[in-house]
Amino acid sequence: MNYIKVKHSGNLGDVIYSLSVLYELSKQRNAKIVYYIHLDQPSTFTDKTHPVGAVMMNKKMFELSYPLLKSQPYIHDVIAIEKNESMIVDYDLDLFRKDHKNLSAADIKTWISVSYPELRADLCEQCLFVEPIPNNYIIINRSQRYNAPLIDYTILEDKGNCMFVGVESEYKVMRAIAPSIEWLQVEDFKQLAGYISGCLLFIGNQSMPFAIAEQLKVKRILEQYYGCPNVLPHGGEHFTFQTQKQFENIINKYIFV
């Protein structure tokens, strides 16, 4: 078996979106991926509401994501690199941070090809694979970053069973809006992907859980932040909104009819 070594130090959403390219690369080269994740690299975020704070990927986030990444059929291994370690790889997936001039626009899934034009993929194709955990829920995620303050989720109160996935502070904000919503807590992100794969509908903003839903190609709705529209859904049944009117139209005219 041939192996291709790649490195990434970005946050987990970026890592999940990189799977489009890695899946295609594995097929083209008849090889498996050895994925090196560089820990504790300084964050480029201007606001510190991100769950990992001042770094892009920490040890805890790596441990939660390892079962999901390692289980992918085209990935041979996932290896953490400590902060001051260096590694010679075939592809450095961090180069786009230097080569791309506006990371708040375009589509995260295409950024790698800015640095490596030969690394392109069919973005409509599923590239994340997991055993579904069937459930009769709408699963919702809304991080503190990348959300518009005027979007109102109370429209979902009478639409059936809803579960929220995210950290406790985010859940408390959502529960204040929609008191009946349950809190889904998972052991790791492989289990999270199983729930998302088996749900009726996923609704989320530009965060890691939406990246999972996007790469699974489940039925999904994206709350796209107008100030940083760098997530564009492809493939499967998907909808995107930036305003409350758009959100209500999607829910009332296309989802619950």
Image (cartoon, helix red, strand yellow):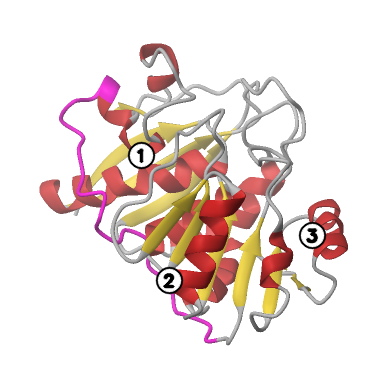
Of badges 3 and 1, the one in the foreground is 3
Q: Quadrant of residue 90?
A: top left
Pick the residue in front: 172 or 100. Answer: 172
Q: Within 10 Å of the Cα at label 3, are there few (<14), some (14-19), or many (20+) other Cα atoms?
A: many
N-terminal-most mark, 3 or 1: 1
Residue designated by label 3: 174
> Is residue 125 toward the left or the right of residue 148 in the image?
left
What residue is drawn where x is 72% and y is 37%? 52
Residue found 79% across the figure and 59% down from its top: 174
The label number, if any, that marks residue 254 in the structure image: 2
Answer left or right for 21 relative to 52.
Answer: left
Give the vertical position of 206 relative to 65 (above or below). Answer: above
Q: Magenta residues, as a range?
A: 114-134
Q: Nearer the viewer, residue 21 or 71?
A: 21
Amino acid carrying label 2: it is: Tyr
Residue at 24% from the left image edge and 58% from the top image edge: 125
Can residue 186 be seen by looking at this rendering? Answer: no
Magenta: main secondary structure = loop
In the rendered image, the quadrant that contains the N terminus is bottom left
Can you give x and y, in whole percent of width and height, for residue 232 in the image?
39, 43
- Against 193, residue 39 (above or below) is above
| Callout 1 amino acid | Lys
Mark 1, residue position:
109
Distance Cα–Cα, label 3 vs label 2:
23 Å
